[in-house]
Image: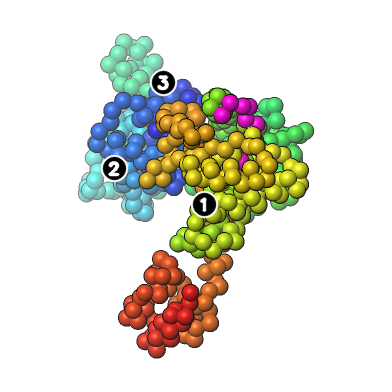
Amino acid sequence: MEELIVEKLRTIPNSPGCYLMKAKDGKVIYVGKAKNLYNRVHSYFTGVHTGKTYLLVNEVKDFSYIVTNSNKEAFILELNLIKEYNPHYNILLIDDKTYPYICLSKEKYPVCYISRKRNKKDKYFGPYPDVTKARETLEIIKNVFHFRKCIKIPKTTCLYYDIGLCLAPCINKDVDYSEEISKLSSFLKGNNTTILQDLTLKMETYSKNLEFEKALEYKKMIESIKASVEKQIISLSDNKDRDFIGYVYEAGDLAINILIMRGGKIIGNHFEVQFYYLDYLDTLITYLETYYSGLKPDEIVVDEEIGHQEFIDLNNYMVVPVKGTKKEILNLSFENAKVSLKNNRQLSVNKSERTKKAVQELEEIVGTEVDRIDIFDNAQLFGTAQVSAMVVFKNRELRKELYRKYKISSRKNDDLDAMREVIYRRYQRMLFEKSEVPSLILVDGAENQINVCIGILRDLNLNIKVAGLKKNEMHKLTSLVYEEREYKLDIHQELFRFLLSLSEEVHRFAITYHKNVRSVELKKSFLDGIEGIGPNRKKALLTYFKNLDEMKNAEIEEFMKLRIPEEVAIRLKRVLECVK
């Protein structure tokens, strides 16, 4: 299991919400909801799974989550997130086949119905996570509002007209439904006070008259309305784009959470921790100015404290709600910021404790206190653009300001020769500048690389401990080599995880530099002077052939496969024969 996942699993709250499973590239591949985020997300990474669950878990490299106030909010948020990210493993939910809508046809004489699919013609309310309650709500609508009940308009009035539940378009061709549509929209958006009062009065009247069966029917209607049509804080009906800014600050840490609403629906959140020194407000204002330097939503919903601050060009977008749905969503953003800061701090503590334990294991092996480690790695491709890189681990953390990169001057395709050069250059400069001496040097390799390094240090009259990171034929870290002894590393060992992180960091740094150098070198080559070889043909040649020898041994016909004219290919072949 990924180390990042192991750490984050420990910090998940026992709260309702939605979780987003992510692949290696950060793409969301599954969205789920849970009454208890801690229990649900943990269940994916414990026990044995089969089928789609096995495939999903095997692909997950990270996850995030959004806390909600209730399971029902999580239900609606899940749908919004699925629509936003279109995750591969949620394919069965994409077409709204799970969630029904209450619909009102846009006809002259409209009818109300339930549908799981949407079209552009009709007006939709929902979606509703509880199918049964949605159907019960539709029955309430039929019994309260005066919309057309007949699928096909009859030639004469029916029973619904006789009992006062239809405006009878069958005989009244000029009937106006605008008032009924307005009442229904208000009702389905949660403004149901008047209807509930009316139904409650009828329920009480039947109960007093000992007509308990009818009273029970009205009680069920009231419960259905409260369950299915209650306000949802996950969405707003005006289809606007909004961001809700929540934040908490404590002991130098400012946690900022932005709940992102698009088209009136929450589709995700953005979380970040910033350091502040004297005034958290200054840091928050600067962050928001930077974050919104480009496109801005229709509204940026903030609390009163932020709303009173002076911004360069954000004040006109800011809204400070006092109560209502916007205020509830803003409170939810603050709650997510609070949870995220707590979890972020716990992750930092856990990482610090693990690093401390790993360094102690390393100190036991090398027999001395380790305050600073210099880690080296070389990078080259077929002898071209040879470089080396050094990263520094000091005082329990990587110190990027101390990283160094070296372009190897030797033309030999020799890793040991590159090691000699970079070690000499690095520590000769250290002596000249009288800079800090590392406690330990780590090199990518085993006995040969270690011996080369020790030999150069001896020539410089330096006594620095040297260890090697030995890897197998698949270039996977297997052991630490020190003083001719090999210490096998277990993947569950803290020392393994620590050394692996150092190895990956120096490799990343070296490869990045190598790509930059090689990109520059590719722009300069003997190919530049050949008539008929322009930038595109040069790029094609350098991409197709792995090295110079392969290009020199190629036949003219092979060059022509790259859409190089025969006369140019002949000219190229002659030049290659002269290249050493």
Q: Residue at x 34, y 52 (%)?
A: 119
The structure's colour scheme is rainbow
> Residue at (45%, 33%) from the top-left corner?
486
Residue corresponding to mark 1? 416
Q: Are marks 2 and 3 in contact (CB under 8 Å)?
A: no
Q: Is residue 235 above or below residue 531?
A: above
Q: Upstream in the sequence, badge 1 or badge 2?
A: 2
Q: Residues within 10 Å of mark 2 (few under 14, many from 20)?
A: few
Magenta-span inclusion, residue 351? no
Residue 430 visible somewhere in the drawing? yes
Question: Which mark, residue 381?
Answer: none
Q: Position of residue 515 (x, y in %)?
A: 53, 59
Q: Earlier in the sequence, mark 2 or mark 3?
A: 2
Magenta residue span? 366-374
Dot label at residue 200: 3
Identify the element where label 2 is drawn: helix
